[in-house]
Image (cartoon, rainbow, N blue to C red):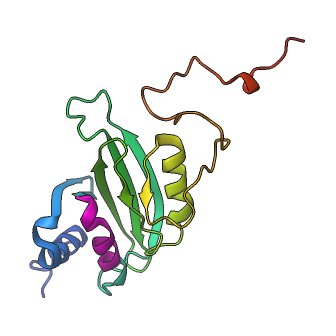
């Protein structure tokens, strides 16, 4: 291929994903050379495996998994978004994947794709209450086991604190 017809990094990733998964590749947003793809939850693990294992893509590093509570946004259904930041060390490419879920709906765990997802998924579970189906050890990671609620939800009562947290007057 000559330079004029060679696909950009974003173009190659999207081309490969469309060839392999077709309509599973949902909404795509490219802004400032950052590509974001919204996927349906059943497509998450197969797409992640492909992105990791395809030798021309090689997204071998999961840098983070985080959550977004879309509670007060204009288009707020489903309520939660789980965001995956991928990186290809060999090709120096970044890719963001998103899945959207309703409250109580589970997201398939990607711990079988990237072991580093273990703690990231536990953090999202702990702080947002999004469960991960197939996670090997889904339990709180930052908050005490008996903590009520999920502190990064927009409807979390930040004014209230548990009794054990309050200090005695000096």
Q: Quadrant of the C terminus?
A: top right
Most extreme residue toward the right is 170
- The answer to whether residue 162 is above or below residue 97 is above
The dominant secondary structure in magenta is helix
Q: Is residue 4 left or right of residue 122?
A: left
Q: Which residues are magenta?
A: 40-51
Q: Position of residue 35 (x, y in %)?
A: 26, 59
Residue 47 on the magenta segment: yes
Number of marks in the image? 0
Residue 94 on the magenta segment: no
Q: Quadrant of the N terminus?
A: bottom left
Residue at left offset 33%, top offset 59%: 96
Q: Is residue 64 left or right of residue 26?
A: right
- The answer to whether residue 103 is above or below residue 50 is above
In the depicted view, which residue is nearer to us: 162 or 88? 162
Q: Position of residue 11 (x, y in %)?
A: 17, 70
Residue at left offset 64%, top offset 41%: 143
Q: Is residue 151 left or right of residue 15?
A: right
- Report which quarter residue 33 is drawn in: bottom left
- Report which quarter residue 2 is drawn in: bottom left
Residue at left offset 38%, top offset 75%: 59
């Amino acid at each position: 291929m000559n330079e004029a017809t060679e696909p950009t990094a974003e173009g190659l990733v999207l081309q490969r994903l469309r060839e392999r998964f077709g309509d599973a590749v949902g909404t795509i947003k490219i802004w400032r050379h950052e590509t974001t793809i919204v996927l349906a939850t059943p497509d998450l693990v197969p797409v992640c495996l492909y992105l990791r294992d395809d030798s021309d893509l090689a997204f071998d590093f999961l840098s983070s998994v985080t959550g977004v509570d879309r509670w007060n946004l204009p288009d707020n259904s489903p309520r939660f978004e789980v965001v995956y930041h991928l990186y290809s060390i060999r090709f120096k490419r970044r890719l963001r994947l998103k899945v959207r879920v309703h409250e109580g709906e589970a997201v398939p765990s990607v711990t079988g794709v990237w072991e580093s997802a273990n703690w990231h998924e536990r953090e999202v579970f702990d702080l947002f209450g999004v469960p991960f189906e197939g996670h090997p050890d889904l339990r709180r990671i930052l908050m005490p086991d008996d903590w009520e609620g999920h502190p990064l939800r927009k409807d979390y009562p930040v004014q209230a604190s548990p009794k054990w947290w309050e200090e005695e007057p000096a």
